[in-house]
């Protein structure tokens, strides 16, 4: 049975040894430093001080708390996250790494093949590599920016962290390969698929890409494409499963395919969530029974889903209300689960164009997918902190580099075919799933769980007019971000009602219709009524 609430500070053992870090590089002082702040990690787990040549700070670890120091001393690599396809990677590099950890593998790739070694890595990670020579360090992200990595320059030193809320500092030094972080001046996010080379003193910072999405499109036959997709997706699932792992299953084709492929290698647990307003339990159960899983249904109150807002914003550290809305149901579910290695069907819709099921033009679809993928590394919706706050380690097989390479290299006519959206995926797993699942129309997680309407209803109760709901969601998310990221308030300490009132009231002051109400105290509910 699934217990009610995850126990704080307990983390799933079957995850990487380092789940987050905040460190200062280019400084060999003795006391911990990362912008002079105590670490404010949302990621749960034992926090350990770490120090190596020219690097000091903290790491949030897995249960094996001794790991980061030992690995850092041996490898010179601080790695948050994990690699996949390790055997093939090792075979490709050749030689022997100094140890068994993924940090050892990264170090081995770098030392043996240099930049070319970093271009080999397929994983979900962010790393600091103490590069030696006159370089202070290399900051390296995976191909999709799957683990967000932030940097702040501070008088010749660099503060680097996997959560923006852990950082302060800004000496105005330009950092190529990064982009500004919303509402956090001076804190920059390293782009996905990027290595940033931090020099010792006064030298310019350089960066170079480690991956780019394919720009060409393959003419491979449709049925061959489907067979290949099943192969790479099966590999991606197989290299991500572990003891006791679970798939969060919506009952749609994306997570259904992950479940069916996981069931080829293990008996996975599957977990599906719904609320009193809506659920997809029947669809999920059909998959679970078809492939044979240890299946669980979790019914949350929709009030708990909207109450997950501060956790979602603190975890993803974004201000895009649409993305946050998408995260709410899963964040609410993650709060309820004991620490688990989780596989999701997240991300399939981006390379497959699944959000655009109404689109009938392959020309437009190809352009849309190309544009969306270029920005995907800074969405942060797949950040491990989403899950890590409750001790989970979540990973997303559709974000495997080989799956992405294949899907992005297919023309839109393989994604939109015979009037069917996401055709190549449906064809790939049609034999693994109930027919109704393989050809089921997409339901977004915020629709299927009723959380979109629940959040809208909550805002309407605060007096937001129907046509202002979208703007209100944006305002609430921005205010929430200021609390949990800039001011580092813990999500558990956020007074959501007060937050709604402040955010909505200050928004009302900016609207012409309500301009005359500037002195009316209290929340928008009174302001609009008056
Ligand atoms: P979506 O593509 O919007 O359906 O959601 C992305 C991923 O979140 C899915 O592939 C599932 O892994 C997970 N998910 C969505 N809805 C649910 C649900 N109701 N219960 C459990 N997991 C879900
Ligand atoms: Mg889905």
Image (cartoon, helix red, strand yellow):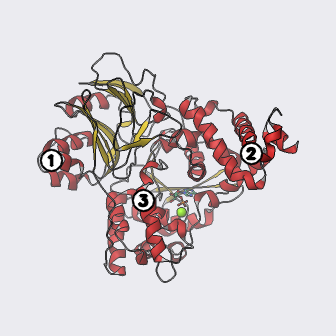
Residue holding disc 3: 373
Image side of residue 73 versus residue 488, left or right: left
Alpha carbons under labels 2 and 3: distance apart: 34 Å
**In the rendered image, the vertical position of residue 184 relative to residue 273, given as above or below:** above
Among numbered discs 1 and 2, the one appearing first in the sequence: 1
- Give the left or right position of residue 414, taking residue 112 as reference: right
At x 39%, y 48%, the residue is 145
Q: Is residue 306 left or right of residue 19?
A: right
Badge 1 crowding class, 10 Å Cα cut-off, few under 14, some 14 to 19, many 20 or more, is: some
In the picture as drawn, the residue positioned furthest to the right comes out as: 530
The CA distance from mark 1 to mark 3 is 28 Å
Residue found at the very far top of the displayed protein: 30
Q: Residue at x 34, y 60 (%)?
A: 213
Q: Is residue 422 visible?
A: no
User: Residue extending furthest left?
Assistant: 95
Q: Quadrant of residue 67?
A: top left
Disc sitting over residue 511 in the figure? 2
Q: Which of the pair 309/73 is nearer the observer?
A: 309
Q: Position of residue 33 (x, y in %)?
A: 38, 21
CA–CA distance in space, label 1 to label 2: 58 Å
Image location of residue 121, percent across then percent down: 26, 50
Residue identifier under label 1? 113
Q: Earlier in the sequence, mark 1 or mark 3?
A: 1
């Amino acid at each position: 049975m699934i217990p009610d609430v995850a126990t704080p500070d307990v983390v799933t053992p079957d995850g990487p040894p380092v789940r987050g870090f905040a460190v200062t590089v280019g400084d060999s002082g003795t006391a911990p430093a990362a912008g002079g702040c105590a670490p404010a990690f949302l990621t749960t787990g034992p926090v350990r001080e770490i120090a190596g040549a020219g690097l000091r700070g903290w790491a949030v670890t897995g249960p094996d708390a001794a790991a980061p120091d030992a690995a850092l001393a041996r490898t010179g690599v601080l790695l948050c996250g994990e690699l996949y396809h390790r055997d093939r990677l090792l075979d490709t590099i050749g030689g022997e790494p100094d140890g068994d950890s993924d940090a050892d593998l990264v170090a081995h790739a770098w030392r043996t093949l240099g930049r070319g070694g970093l271009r080999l890595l397929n994983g979900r990670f962010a790393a600091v590599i103490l590069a030696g020579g006159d370089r202070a360090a290399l900051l390296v992200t995976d191909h999709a920016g799957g683990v967000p990595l932030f940097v702040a320059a501070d008088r010749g030193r660099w503060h680097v962290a996997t959560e923006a809320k852990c950082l302060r500092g800004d000496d105005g030094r330009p950092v190529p390969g990064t982009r500004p972080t919303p509402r956090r001046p001076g804190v920059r996010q390293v782009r996905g698929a990027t290595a940033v080379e931090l020099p010792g003193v006064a030298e310019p910072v350089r960066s170079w890409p480690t991956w780019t999405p394919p720009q060409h499109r393959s003419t491979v036959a449709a049925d061959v494409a489907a067979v290949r997709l099943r192969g790479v997706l099966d590999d991606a699932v197989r290299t991500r499963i572990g003891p006791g792992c679970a798939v969060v299953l919506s009952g749609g084709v994306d997570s259904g395919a992950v479940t069916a492929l996981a069931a080829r290698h293990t008996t996975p647990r599957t977990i599906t969530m719904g609320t009193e307003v809506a659920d997809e339990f029947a669809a999920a159960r059909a998959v679970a029974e078809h492939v044979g899983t240890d299946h669980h249904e979790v019914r949350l109150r929709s009030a708990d889903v909207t109450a997950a807002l501060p956790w979602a914003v603190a975890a993803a550290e974004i201000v895009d209300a649409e993305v946050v809305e998408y995260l709410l149901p899963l964040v609410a579910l993650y709060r309820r689960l004991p620490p688990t290695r989780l596989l999701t069907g997240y991300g399939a819709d981006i390379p497959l164009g699944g959000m655009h099921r109404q689109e009938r033009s392959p020309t437009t679809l190809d352009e849309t997918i190309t544009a969306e993928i270029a920005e995907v590394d800074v969405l942060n919706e797949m950040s491990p902190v989403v899950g890590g706050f409750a001790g989970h380690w979540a990973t997303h097989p559709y974000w495997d580099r080989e799956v992405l390479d294949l899907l992005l290299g297919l023309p839109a006519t393989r994604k939109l075919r015979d009037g069917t959206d996401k055709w190549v995926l449906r064809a790939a797993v049609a034999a693994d799933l109930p027919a109704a699942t393989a050809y089921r129309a997409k339901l977004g997680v915020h629709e299927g769980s009723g959380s979109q309407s629940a959040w809208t209803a909550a805002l309407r109760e605060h007096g937001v007019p129907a046509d202002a709901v979208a703007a209100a969601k944006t305002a609430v998310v921005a205010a929430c971000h200021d609390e949990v990221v800039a001011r580092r308030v813990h999500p558990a300490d956020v007074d959501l009602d007060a937050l709604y009132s402040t955010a909505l009231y200050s928004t009302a002051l900016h609207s012409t219709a309500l301009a005359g109400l500037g002195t009316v105290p209290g929340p928008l509910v009174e302001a609009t009524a008056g």
